[in-house]
Image (cartoon, grey):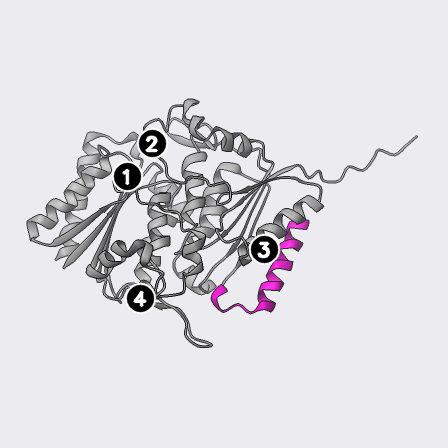
Amino acid sequence: MRALIIFCHPKIDSFNAAVLNTVTAHLDAVGVEYRTRDLYRSNFMPVLTAHELDCYLDESCNADPVAQDVADVQWADALIFIYPTWWYGLPAMLKGWLDRVLLPGVAFIMPKGEGDNIRPGLTHIKRLGVFTTCGASWWLTTLIGAPGRRMLTRGVRAICAKRCRTVFAAHYLMDSSTETSRSAYLRTVAARMERLTA
Amino acid sequence: MTAAPTVPAVPQHAMVLAAHPVPDSFNQALHAETVKTLQARGWSVDDCDLYAEGFNPVMSEAERRGYHDIPDNTAPVQDYVTRLQAADALVMVFPVWNFGYPAMLKGFLDRVFLPGVSFRLDDGKVVPNLTRIRRLAAVTTYGGTRLRAMLCGDPPRKCVTRAVWHVCRPRTTKYLALYDMNRASDTARRRFLDHVGEQLRTF
C-alpha cells in the first residue's frame, strides 16, 4: 500500500493537524509508505486557468502545470483526504486540487466515439479515506445532503477501483467541541485507519 | 378618479456571480444571456465575473483565525460583502467540475459568506442572514449525465438549493442545468440557452 495524503487547513496548529498526525502515526506503525501534500503550506494555487482549460482535453500536456501532483496520484494506491468542511463542502483550496489534478487522462478516460461515455481513470486507487470536521450538526449536514462528503465518497470513489475500500469519519458541531469529543474523534480516526490498512 | 398605477412585480438589484475562465466558452455565453435577460426585465445587475475580477478564493490563515470576529472578519473582502448585501436576487453561473463548483466559486462562499454576513450564530445555531435575497438561481453545465450526478447525490445542486438557500430563504429558487455537456449537440446547447433566457424572464 502507498498512500497519498491530501491535507488542507490554513492553520498549522489546527485540530485537523492532529487528525493528520493520527493518520501518519498509524501509517508509520504499520509500515505503509506515504506522501503528504500540504496544500496550504506549499501554496497550492487552486484556480484552474483559461490556459489550462484550453488544453484540458489534450492529454499530452494538460498535466504539465501539476506534474508532481499527477505523479503522486499515479504512484499511490490509496488516497486520504483531511480537511475542514466549509459550507457543507470542501475548502476552495481542496476543490481546486480536484479541479486541476483530476484531469482527463489521469482521472477520467474521455469518450472516444459517439455514444461512448466517460470512464473511470483512477482504477489503481483501491483505498479511500476521508476525515473532516464540520461546524454543523450531523442532522443539518444530512438534511443539506452532505455535498462535501458525497463529492469524495461517491464522486471520486466512482472513478476509483471497483469496490474501493472506503472509510469516513467526521467530527460534527466543531464549534462546541470539547477535549473529550476531540480525543474521541481521534480514536475513531485511528480505528478507521486500522480498517483502511487492514 | 384615476386608477392606481399598476406596479409591475418590481425587479430590483441582482448580483450575478460567474466563474468560468474562458471568455468564449459556452458558460460565458450563458453568463451573457443571464445578464442581458435580467437587464431587459429592468433589473439593475451587478455583474461579478470572479475570474475577470481576479478574485482570490483561498481563505488565509489570518482570515480563518478571525473568522468569527464580527464585524472585523469582513475587512479582507469588504467590497464583495457590500455588493452581496445589496442584492435582492443572486444568480450563480458556473460549470460543474469534478462533482462540484469550481474552486473560484467555492472560495467566494468560504471567504464572503461569513458569520454576520450570510448567517448569525445564535447559541451555536445558524440563523439565515441574507434574507434580502428573495430570488436565487443557478445556471450550470455538467460534463456527466444527470444519472451520474444523481448517483453522487448531485453535490452542486444541493449546495445551491439547500446550503445557499438555507441562508437566504428566497421566495423563488431556480436550478437550471444542462447535463452531459461533453456530448451535447449545438441544438441542445442552443435550446438550453433559450431555456435559461425564458426562465429568467419570469424570475
* SS of the residue under disc 4: loop
Q: Which of marks 2 and 3 is nearer the N terminus?
A: 3
Q: Is residue B203 visible?
A: no
| Subunit under mark 2 | B
> Which residue in the protein does label 1 denote?
A9
Are discs 4 and 3 both within one chain? no
- Which amino acid, by three-letter code, is at mark 2? Arg
Are discs 2 and 3 both within one chain? yes
The residue at the point 16 percent across, 46 percent down is: A23
Look at the picture and state if B185 lies above or below A88: below
* SS of the residue under disc 3: helix
Label for residue A121?
4
Left or right of residue B183, residue A24 in this image: left
Q: How crowded is mark 2: few (under 14 residues within 10 Å), some or many (20 or more)?
A: some
For marks 1 and 3, give the one nearer the viewer.
3
Q: Is residue A26 visible?
A: yes
- Which amino acid, by three-letter code, is at mark 4? Gly
Give the distance between the C-alpha atoms of the residues marked 1 and 3, in whole angstroms. Answer: 35 Å
> Which residue in the protein does label 2 denote?
B64
Q: How crowded is mark 1: few (under 14 residues within 10 Å), some or many (20 or more)?
A: many
Q: Earlier in the sequence, mark 1 or mark 4?
A: 1
On the image, the x and y values in percent for residue B15 come to: 58, 39
Q: Residues within 10 Å of mark 4 (few under 14, many from 20)?
A: many
Q: In which quarter of the image is the N terminus of chain A?
A: bottom left
Q: Give the range drawn in magenta.
A: B180-203
> Which residue in the protein does label 3 denote?
B29
- Which amino acid, by three-letter code, is at mark 3? Ala
